[in-house]
Image (spheres, rainbow, N blue to C red):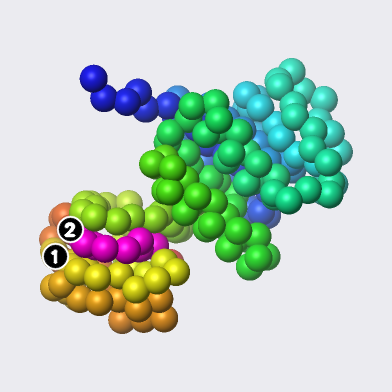
Amino acid sequence: MGTEIKKCAVISGAPENNLSYYNKYLKDRYIICADSGYKKCERLNITPDLIIGDFDSSSKPDVLCEIIELQVRKDDTDTFYCIKEAINRGYNDIVILGGIGSRIDHTYSNILSVNYCFERNVNSALVNEKNMLTVISGETVIKKGEFEFFSLFALFEKCFGVSIKGAQYELECAELEPSAQFTQSNAFKNDVVIINAEKGKIILILSND
């Protein structure tokens, strides 16, 4: 028997005008809001299952759901605390919504959260209206449809045996340095693209912008 897939959505507080894309990611997921992320649930008329935060950027909500209040002075961001709590509760498929914003430091910390999940064999993705970011290794199949472009970047260290098949720009058993940018802004040639990294971790970004 395979491992049961338990799905969770973590909603962070980055400012967003359009929340309509949330609907396709929230179905059948346990919903955790990071601090002011609960205000997005209010806009969507959704009650989250859990709210976690120090409430320094918003008032503590008066809602009928579980709330974990954190100290303002702490080592983890509210969103990262939510990720850890989700994993502790057995969730192994996590999507982070509202985690890409104007604060580069906040966005980068959420990218690190995706890597944290990857290292613990938890599927995760950082998503906004026009982008999806995840960490991959080995063989990964992506399908044409929702996103038009994709980019690859070596994460932290050189990747070896990197191949791309079915794309406008294909690659065969290449080395990818962390500073390399020749795998940015690729596009689908076929309906399916196969990416392989024999050694190392890759940031995969799917985009429509």
Vertical relation: 166 (above or below) 84:
below
Q: Kindly indicate the quadrant of the structure image that contains residue 166.
A: bottom left
Q: Nearer the viewer, residue 122 or 50?
A: 122
Residue range (magenta): 195-203
Examine the residues drawn in magenta and state their main secondary structure. Answer: strand
Residue 58 vertical placement versus 100 (above, below): above
In front here: 85 or 99? 85
Residue positioned 75% across, 29% down in the render: 68
Where residue 138 appears, x then y in whole percent? 24, 55
* Above or below, comparing residue 35 to residue 64 in the picture: below
Measured from the top left, where is residue 77 in percent x and y?
A: 70, 50
Circle on res. 165: 1
Q: Is residue 185 above or below residue 123?
A: below
Kindly identify which residue carries mark 2: 194
Q: Residue 152 colored magenta?
A: no
Q: Is residue 81 left or right of residue 71?
A: left
Mark 2: few/some/many CA within 10 Å (<14, 14-19, 20+) = some
Secondary structure beneath dot 2 equals: strand
Three-letter residue code for mark 2:
Ile
- Residue drawn 60% across the image and 33% down it: 85
- Which residue is at the front of the view, 158 or 41? 158
145, 79: nearer the viewer: 79
Indicate left or right for 143 with 118 as reference.
left
> In which quarter of the view is residue 107 placed?
bottom right
Q: Secondary structure at mark 1?
A: strand
- Please state the horizontal and vertical placement of residue 208, each as a whole percent of the image: 39, 62
Amino acid type, callout 1:
Lys
| Circles 1, 2 touching at the beta carbon (< 8 Å) | yes
